[in-house]
Image: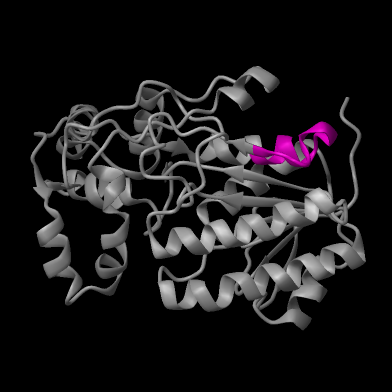
Amino acid sequence: MIQKKDMQTIIGSGGAIGKELAKALPRYTNKIRLVSRKPKKVNSTDEILAADVLNKNDLEKAVRGSEIVYVTLGLPYSYKIWKEKWPEFIQNLLVICEQEKFKLVFFDNIYMYDENSLNPASEKSKIHPPSKKGQVRAKIAQMIMEKIEKGTIKALIARSADFYGPSIKDTSILTETAFKPLSQGKTANWLVNDSFKHSFTYTPDAGKATALLGNTKKAYGQVWHLPTAKNPLTGKEWVEQIAKRMHVKPKYRIVSKFMVKIIGLFVPVMRESFEMLYQYDRDYVFDSSKFENEFDFEPTSYKAGIDEIIKCDYKTKADRKSH
């Protein structure tokens, strides 16, 4: 039986990863604090705390008395905001971490990796961000690792590929470009080129794995890739598989870089996404074998992930006909 521990706090508990992490943590503790601007309980015993964690005073209150603090925070998808707010937030967090002596688990992406180190992308991939937002991510990861190396904090970094999963609103590109339009009988969209492989991390797996890492002493001081299925689908295969499970035609269009730039004149998030399109003009294959081997963890297959999302969030064409 796993011993129950002291307070474990999730900063950014309202996002897709924060929610899945909260579901996974009761295996390790009966003291869970959820922190966001408008927090909601996931488990009946959760403690909730409304806070603006970009404010240092609020952040101090949010983490007080914690044994482990998980950061699954998402900031608005804007380089201007990221450049200003991410380093400031991390600096404040690290200062408080040194003072309060809690363990830190930082949920990260792979924007900092060299564009030619994505097939496969592993914990050993070269740090050479090809985008401005990637430069920010590299900087804040370096801030954390420097403190780890100095021995002033106990922390780890958990990295995910682009993610997908049930009940995600607006934060999964696969949901927005494929699941939603296909479920509505519309044409799906795929960015740049549909012939390249693209990995996606299943959010329930990410939540379980992040909780496991946080509660494993020997995991600290390292970077970990969260469990992600091998042999990713190409863009064409993603659309075909989702459409097949929904019993609809696999209609889709390829959105070129030029079109993204034009749309970006009117849609800010598309403008911000332009610099990230290199992830779609080559194979993007995420390697999580380090985690899988260490913890004997088999990631959810893409087929099972697609089926669960449709079951939870969408009625198939056959379902609609029967009602």
Residue drawn at (25%, 69%), measured in percent from left and top?
A: 271
Residue 38 place in picture, x, y as percent: 60, 72
Residue 240 place in picture, x, y as percent: 17, 29
Is there any visible trace of residue 90 in the rendered image?
yes
Choose top left, top right, bottom left or bottom right for residue 131.
Answer: bottom left
* Residue 222 sits inside the magenta stretch: yes
Residue drawn at (75%, 68%), measured in percent from left and top?
A: 93
Residue 138 place in picture, x, y as percent: 55, 56
Front-lying residue, 194 or 20: 194
Span shown in magenta: 210-223
Front-lying residue, 319 or 43: 43
Front-lying residue, 150 or 121: 150
Side of 299 where 102 appears, left or right? right
Residue drawn at (71%, 56%), measured in percent from left and top?
A: 144
Choose top left, top right, bottom left or bottom right for residue 62.
Answer: bottom right
* Residue 146 sits inside the magenta stretch: no
Residue drawn at (77%, 42%), measured in percent from left and top?
A: 221
Above or below for 316 versus 12: above
Side of 99 where 45 appears, left or right? left
How many numbered marks appear? 0
